[in-house]
Amino acid sequence: MLAQLKSATVLGLSVYMVEIEVDAAAGLPAWDIVGLADTAVKESKERVRTAIKNAGYEVPPRRIVVNLAPAYLRKEGPSFDLAIAIAILSVTEQLHCDNLDSYLLLGELSLDGSLRPVRGILPISLEYSSSDYTLLVPAPNEEESAIGGTATFGFSHLRDVVHFLENPDQYQPVTVTLPDFSQLAAIQTLHDFSQVKGQSEAKRALEIAAAGNHNILMVGSPGSGKTMLSQALPGILPPLTFEESLSLSKIYSIAGLLPDKQPLVLQRPFRSPHHSASSASIIGGGRIPHPGEVSLSHHGVLFLDEFPEYRREVLEALRQPLEDGEVTVSRVQAQITFPCRFLLAASMNPCPCGYYNDPHRECTCTPATLHRYRSRISGPLLDRFDLQLEVVPVSFQELHREQPVEDSAAIRQRVIKARQIQQKRFANSGTIHNGAMTAAQIQAFCQLDQSSRTFLEQAFQKLGLSARAHNRILKVARTIADLSGAEQIQLPHLAEAIQYRTLDKKLWME
């Protein structure tokens, strides 16, 4: 006898249907799983066998063969447990259901027959939202599946699934209410900008970075406030849109990082990996590639503290994702592309001892040590920072000044207004902020008058800027103009944008 039903798997962000075929023939009792299955899938025979028994059913002493088709596609993880168990109950006539082909089954089985949540439910549900399939998933995944739009039923135990398949009219599909994305609260950050004393120039630069999603590098002595400023940055970012939340939630679903009892990511991520992180953990990788920190920071902030301390190969691997907004991980078995349109905020000391040009401490680094330290950041990578900022130590007077300091909420409102201008400008173009403008969009939306063009030409020649730096200056100037509500880029906007490109000439070209 033969039973056939369907499940699905996720490879990167791509969804593939997997057909589960189970044959139970007379012969010596045995159980084989074929179809390019990994260890977790092959171990399912022990989980499924025990779960069926403890759920009150039987696994007859037959030769059972489970085939996962297509055979060329590698399958991983425990998400096929439920489908295999239902197929066995069907082929052994312990389950009577005439329309098994209309269901997609996903779920991991515990030994007592209860269902555990699995990864990747959201992209699978989105893939089949316009089909006639009904998704049967573990109860903890039911809201995540319903968000995707596919008719969904959630269950806690194998017995519940069997009862549903034999009595589907007694059940109602899961419904979920979407949050009002226009009313989402600000991200709860460790620090508020009102707690940061002084550093008005740094705050201004971070406001520009948030408004246009521009990458920013902060260089300063230890204790000058670089980390505190970066940790306050997410608090001035605008709320996620529904489309951004859905795109981000798909990545978190695949990574198994969706918040408990929350089917969508509702706040922009702030990721801060340690400088000992490997290239695979930052960029993404594994035998079957999984998203790395750059993708987990999609539509949010990736903060790299002590920037030169990261491995050279990790830093150089950032160059392509920063430019393209996506990262492609190639392996023998697959080539996977993940989105990674993030804001990179990096901080570093000016030298190994940290006190180069510090007004109060003397630097003890030799020229050779200084050169080795700064050369860890290559010119092409440095060129990809739209904003380069020197953070100077805060004076005692500024620390004890009683004058009220602008909080994150006020800055956030200006950032939101600037982003709204950009949304209208780039409507239906696929671009969502100034930092992602294409060359054609720069030409269309960053027009300069004659005086501004002459000023930019002089800066281009004097600073020895690259074509990439030229375009990034125009992007930043466009954001500064948006923050001021100006229709066209004016000379003060351009001058402010250029000043954020001079730090590399001051420190790296000495």
Image (cartoon, helix red, strand yellow):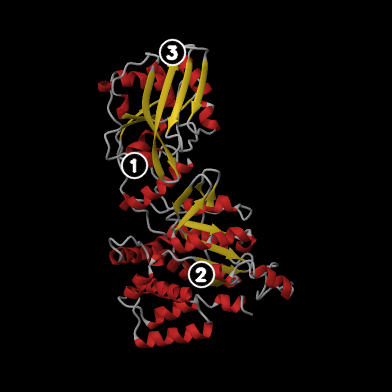
Q: Nearer the viewer, residue 261 or 22?
A: 22
Residue 119 visible, this angle: yes
Q: Residues within 10 Å of mark 3 (few under 14, many from 20)?
A: some
Q: Is residue 11 left or right of residue 219?
A: left
Q: CA distance from mark 2 to mark 3?
A: 66 Å
Indicate which disc, 2 or 3, sits on the residue closer to the N terminus: 3
Q: Residue at x 34, y 18 (%)?
A: 163
Disc 1: which residue? 127
Q: Secondary structure at mark 2?
A: helix
First in sequence, mark 2 or 1: give its number: 1
Residue 266, relative to residue 103: is it above or below?
below
Residue 147 location, quadrant: top left
Tell me if label 3 and label 1 are in contact, CB under 8 Å.
Answer: no
Q: Amino acid at mark 1?
A: Glu
Q: Label 1 crowding class (10 Å Cα cut-off): few <14, some 14-19, many 20+?
A: some
Which residue is situated farthest in the left direction here?
A: 169
Quarter of the image where the C terminus is located: bottom right
Amino acid type, residue under disc 3 in the picture: Tyr
Q: Secondary structure at mark 3?
A: loop
- Disc 1 is placed on an element classified as helix
* Residue denoted by label 2: 202
- Let me know if residue 257 appears in the view: no
- Tell me, for residue 57, which label it has, or none: 3
Residue at left offset 48%, top offset 55%? 327
Left or right of 290, for residue 246: left
